[in-house]
Every structure is written in structure tokens, then in C-alpha cells.
Image (spheres, rainbow, N blue to C red):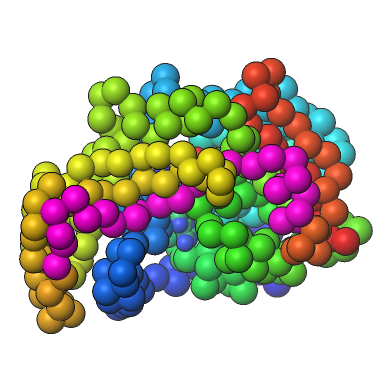
Amino acid sequence: MEPLTAGAIVVDCLLGPGDERSLADDVLDGLTRPLKELPPKHFYDARGAELFDQICELPEYYPTRAERAILLEHSDGIVERTGAAELVELGSGTAAKTRLLLHAMAKAGHLRRYVPLDVTEAMVRETAEQLVEELPGLSVHGIVGDFERHLAHVPPAHDGPRIVAFLGGTIGNFPPGSRRRFLRAIARLLRPGRDWLLLGTDLVKDPAVIEAAYDDAPGVTAEFNRNVLEVVNRELDADFDVEAFEHVAFFDREREWIEMRLRASRRMRVRVGALGLDVDFAPREELRTEISAKFSPERLRGDLAAAGLDLREVLTDPDDLFALSLSTPA
Ligand code: SAH
Ligand code: AVI
């Protein structure tokens, strides 16, 4: 176990230059299916991360504001209930909301270590540097990695209790089976009787409100969506005509998730040079780029139970838009 030195930063980089393999596999797998699909983790290059930040500021995109409101109201209570000395965060991004929790931990006098894990290296490094400046006594062990492949690299816990946080509703970006499998993998990181999962989930609500959040008037989400094609062009030497794809977002009432798709405006043949692959699009053919599941209390409880987790507390914002839940290993 590494010593905890206040102000120290360690960053493990698990995504080497050869990691475009993961994108190559996903493109080969996803673009040769009858319903073409790409996993959402490829949105987040530097431009994608910047666009996501802009999305979080949009009036239509309520999840960030609602989750922040919950943390503003309840961070002290979460820290008191859990006694957490460490915070591990999956898909940490800029840790904008996480700061509220870290400050509450510092105020309670038990903040020791923050472990952010994200695919975007610059965000992990910049966040680590800002936080050790901001919070004297904190050490940061950052991980640049894929939370689906690299959970085993989360360092062992020190003495005190720890929270594993998965915020923003990112759990909703998994399809149902993988979602439960992933929650089970998180549960294995938690020591019974000591550690907690803090999970952010967007709640089921009026479909019009959800659809507006994923199809904002200025078109930022549309640009975020199309950016994944820029990533494939750059990383895999492809020739997508990015502007020829239209942003589509619709709420699937039966599955209770929103889907983002990119619709080809005309017939197209796209060359993916690095794979020697030609991909044909029929006019109006769609490529699914993201699902974002919305949760009812039953879905939340069911998913957690299936992963061996006991739901202990659910906190919501005043408008009941979003939920933060605390769970422990069953
Ligand atoms: N937690 C932040 C950011 C959410 S955006 C918030 O609540 O605002 C989703 C974040 O998860 C991005 O920072 C993205 O880079 C990261 N991410 C997406 N897929 C990932 C994966 N497979 N492994 C690690 N990080 C991932
Ligand atoms: C990161 N994730 C939870 C966001 C979401 O709402 O599903 C990503 C996003 N997609 C479009 N807008 C934001």
C-alpha cells in the first residue's frame, strides 16, 4: 500500500498509445451490425470533454444542476453517515460537483485521499493538481483508464471507510445487463461494514423534459454527438462526412431510456482506413451512439439488489429530477 503523503499526486496511466485498439474493436464490432452502434466512451476526447462541460451549463440539461443541488444540501450528511476518509470516483471528469463532497470531508476532518478514474488524461491530471492546491492534506491517486477494464487498478483502501462515487447518471449509459454486471464489479471494491457506493441516477419524468435535455436549442448536444465521428476520423483514418449526419434524440417509453443517434442524410460509403473497412449507410440509416437510462425507484432498487447491494438512502433534489443513493454491500 503506498504511503499517504499530504499534497502528493500519483497518476497511473493505463491507456497507452496502442489503446486505439479499443476504438478499433468497437468500430469493427459496432459498424458491421444491422443496427449500427458505437459505445459512448469514445465521445470524450479533449473536444468532447469541452462540449460535455458546455452541456452541463445549458438550461435544458437539468441533471448536473439537480445533482449539484442534492450535494449542496446533503454533502455534510453523506460524510457524517459514511465517515468516509477516501473518495474513489469513476468517470470523474472535472470533478466539479465532487468538490462539494471533498470539502465536506475536509470540514469533518477526515479527508485523506481522492482517487479519480477517467479515460481523459488531461482531466485527471488537471483535477489532481487543482485539488491538492485547494485542499491542504489531500493526496490524489489518479487513474487514466477505462472503468470497464481497469477497476482492479483502484488502489487498496487505507484504514478509514471509503465512498466509491459514480455520479452524473453515467450508470444509465450502460445497457441493462452490463449495468448490473458493472454494479457487481463496483460492489467487489467495497468492504462490507465499511464502504459505500454513492450513485447518481437520473429519474423518469415527462419525456418532453428529457428530450429537450438531449436536443438543446443551440445544438451543443448535436455537436457533442457528431464529435464521435471526428474521433473515428482522426484515430482510425476514416472519412465520415460529419456534417452529413443529423443528431437524433428520442425517449423510448418502454425501455425508459433516451437514445442518441446519428442519422445519415444520404447514401454514403465510409472508408475506415486503419481497418481496411468500408461501411455503407442507406439514406436515413441511423447509428446509435448512446443510451441514457432513466430510473424509477423499482429500477434502482432492482439493479442494486441484483449486484449484491443494499439501498440505504435515496436523496433527491426539490423537483425530484435526479437521485443520489447510498448503498452498502449486502
Ligand atoms: N462525473 C462527471 C462527468 C460525467 S461525463 C459529472 O457527473 O459531471 C462522463 C465521464 O465519464 C467523462 O468524464 C468521461 O470521460 C468518463 N468516461 C466515459 N466512459 C468511460 C470509461 N469507459 N472509463 C472511464 N471513464 C469514462
Ligand atoms: C455522461 N452521461 C451521464 C451523460 C448523459 O446524460 O447520459 C452524457 C450526455 N449525453 C448527452 N448529453 C449528456
Give the position of the N terminus as an image quadrant: bottom right
Q: Residue at x 62, y 74 (%)?
A: 152
Instruction: Ligand 2: give its quadrant.
Output: top left
The x, y position of residue 137, in whole percent, is 66, 44
The part of the image, by quadrant, that contains residue 319 is: top right
Query: Can residue 218 be seen?
Result: yes
Residue appearing at x 67%, y 24% in the figure: 320
Query: What is the total number of numbered labels drawn onto the structure image?
Result: 0
Q: Quadrant of the C terminus?
A: bottom right
Q: Is residue 297 magenta?
A: yes
Side of 121 where 86 appears, left or right:
right
**284, 290: nearer the viewer:** 284
Name the residue: 43% across, 68% down.
13
Q: Position of residue 205 (x, y in %)?
A: 59, 29
Q: Is residue 317 above or below residue 233?
A: above
Judge by depth and name the residue closer to the eye, 161 or 52.
52
Image coords of residue 295 (percent x, y):
64, 42
Q: Residue furthest right?
A: 193
List x then y, in percent, for residue 74: 75, 28
The answer to whether residue 62 is above or below residue 299 is above
Left or right: residue 311 versus residue 100 is right
- Residue in the foreground of this view, choosing between 217 and 167: 217
Q: Is residue 2 above or below residue 52?
A: below
Q: Over which residues does the magenta segment extend?
A: 280-304
